[in-house]
Amino acid sequence: DSGVTQTPKHLITATGQRVTLRCSPRSGDLSVYWYQQSLDQGLQFLIQYYNGEERAKGNILERFSAQQFPDLHSELNLSSLELGDSALYFCASSVAKGDIQYFGAGTRLSVL
Amino acid sequence: QQPVQSPQAVILREGEDAVINCSSSKALYSVHWYRQKHGEAPVFLMILLKGGEQKGHEKISASFNEKKQQSSLYLTASQLSYSGTYFCGTEGNNDMRFGAGTRLTVKP
């Protein structure tokens, strides 16, 4: 158990819909990272937050947004969903830049 | 820009050694190595920081050539449990990028 909690584990929805993925980092970790992993593909970095502020942005679509709350949990919002958004979404947390990232179990999103 | 990993795949017999390479075209702050088994989350193996600091598991070794922005992961005396996909992640000033992965299969 990495100590990073992601909910829900599975999500099935339809095209055009909006979903919210939630991540609770390990106790004491200030950084949260979001990644997308399509079937048998590598990890695509989406966005990073540190202590409530956006720190870095990767290949995140405009239809996607995220935030980190004062209690350090983070949410990834995906809207106007398309079939191609079906993927595993991982959240990872670390104490700071250059530190070990601990990954949650992921949320598997299926867009039908 | 995504780091480049090589080889893409490797098959070993138990007890054999392997080296996985990772190179980046950008100046790096750190290099991370993770292993992922099918359908599971990536698991931390090693992190190498600019300046020489390393954090990792005892049985794993790796190197980081800061001048060339290259890192190598050394797997010795492989075990069946080493099978999985190995990803290198490179951390720059403002982002984190992962390579496409190296699929390692260890056979009895």
Image (tube, coloured by chain):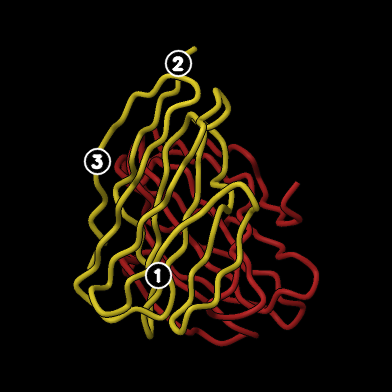
- Marks 2 and 1 sit apart, C-alpha to C-alpha, by 32 Å
| B102 to the left or right of A28 | left
What residue would you read off at disc 2? B107
Earlier-in-chain disc, 2 versus 3:
3
Q: Chain of mark 3?
A: B
Q: Looking at this view, is A19 or B32 the one in front?
A: B32
For the C terminus of chain A, the quadrant is: top left
Question: Foreground residue, A8 or B7?
Answer: B7
Q: Vertical placement of A38 versus B81: above or below? A: below
At label 3, the amino acid type is Pro
Tell me what hue chain A is rendered in: red
Q: Secondary structure at mark 3?
A: loop
Residue hosting label 3: B7
Judge by depth and name the residue closer to the eye, B65 or B98.
B65
Viewer-nearest of discs 2 and 1: 2
Disc 1 versus disc 3: distance between alpha carbons?
Answer: 21 Å
Which chain does tag 1 point to? B
Instruction: Using the rendered image, report if marks 2 and 1 lie on a common chain.
Output: yes
Residue at the (54%, 46%) spot, across then down: B42
In terms of depth relative to the viewer, which is nearer, B31 or A71?
Answer: B31
Name the residue located 49 percent from the left edge and 12 percent from the top edge: B108
Which residue is the site of mark 1?
B96
What shade has chain B been given? yellow
Residue type pointed to by label 2: Lys
Amino acid type at mark 1: Met
Q: Which residue is farthest left?
A: B25
